[in-house]
Image (cartoon, rainbow, N blue to C red):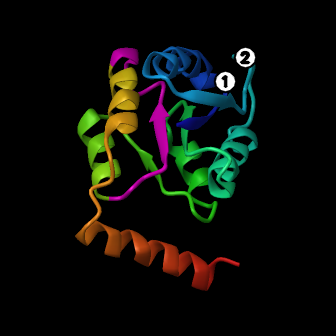
């Protein structure tokens, strides 16, 4: 898989650790920034990474900020992106199994590093279950097509 990575200053250190997990699992990635812990605005990086997923340039995104909330709000504004803010491996598993999430958001200030890296591993190794869940995910896509122009 090709993963779009992005963070703001609060998520920078965790984003750098996530790169090690991606390499361990054999995934490629594109880093959309930021490149330091210097204060910056999360939308500048979240939108670029989410748009790469929407265009099909990347298969999924992993977005990190202090709480994960800002990144999630931005990513979910991009049609075709289904971003999930996860603070547990169970949430990461369910967002893939049931919602076919293609963007994972993590709060670096709210989730310890070990848990965050386990969340990443779970997100990347859990397939979409399909079945009855596909009907529900398709309803999201239909809404986007009808209402988001």
- Residue 20: give x, y in percent of width and height: 51, 14
**Magenta segment includes 121:** no
Task: Check residue 116 in the rendering and tell me which mark sits there, or answer none.
Answer: none
Residue drawn at 46 percent across, 18 percent down: 21
- Residue 99: give x, y in percent of width and height: 35, 59
Residue drawn at 58 percent across, 36 percent down: 2
Task: Check residue 36 in the rendering and tell me which mark sits there, or answer none.
Answer: 2
Residue drawn at 69 percent across, 52 percent down: 51
| Quadrant housing residue 28 | top right
Asked whether the residues under the numbered discs 2 and 1 touch, taking CB atoms below 8 Å apart as contact, a structural biologist would say yes
Task: Using a 10 Å C-alpha cutoff, classify the residue at mark 1 as few (fewer than 14 neighbours), some (14 to 19) or many (20 or more).
Answer: many
Query: Which secondary structure, mark 2?
Result: loop
Q: Which residues are magenta?
A: 99-114
Disc with the residue nearer the chain's start (2 vs 1):
1
Query: Which secondary structure, mark 1?
Result: helix
Image side of residue 91 versus residue 124, left or right: left
Q: Which residue is mark 1?
A: 9
- Residue 74: give x, y in percent of width and height: 62, 52
Residue 130 vs residue 87, the one in the foreground? 130
Q: Quadrant of the C terminus?
A: bottom right
Residue drawn at 27 percent across, 49 percent down: 94
């Amino acid at each position: 898989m090709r993963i779009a990575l992005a963070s703001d200053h609060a998520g920078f250190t965790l984003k750098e650790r996530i790169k090690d997990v991606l390499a361990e699992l054999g995934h490629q990635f594109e880093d959309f920034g930021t490149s330091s812990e210097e204060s910056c605005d999360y939308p500048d990086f979240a939108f670029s990474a989410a748009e790469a997923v929407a265009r099909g340039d990347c298969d999924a995104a992993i977005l990190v900020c202090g709480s994960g909330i800002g990144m999630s709000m931005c990513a979910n504004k991009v049609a075709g992106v289904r971003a999930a803010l996860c603070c547990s491996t169970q949430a990461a598993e369910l967002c893939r199994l049931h919602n076919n999430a293609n963007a994972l958001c993590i709060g670096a200030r709210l989730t310890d590093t070990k848990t965050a890296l386990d969340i990443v591993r779970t997100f990347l190794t859990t397939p979409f279950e399909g079945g009855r869940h596909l009907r529900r995910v398709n309803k999201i896509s239909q809404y986007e097509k009808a209402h988001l122009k």
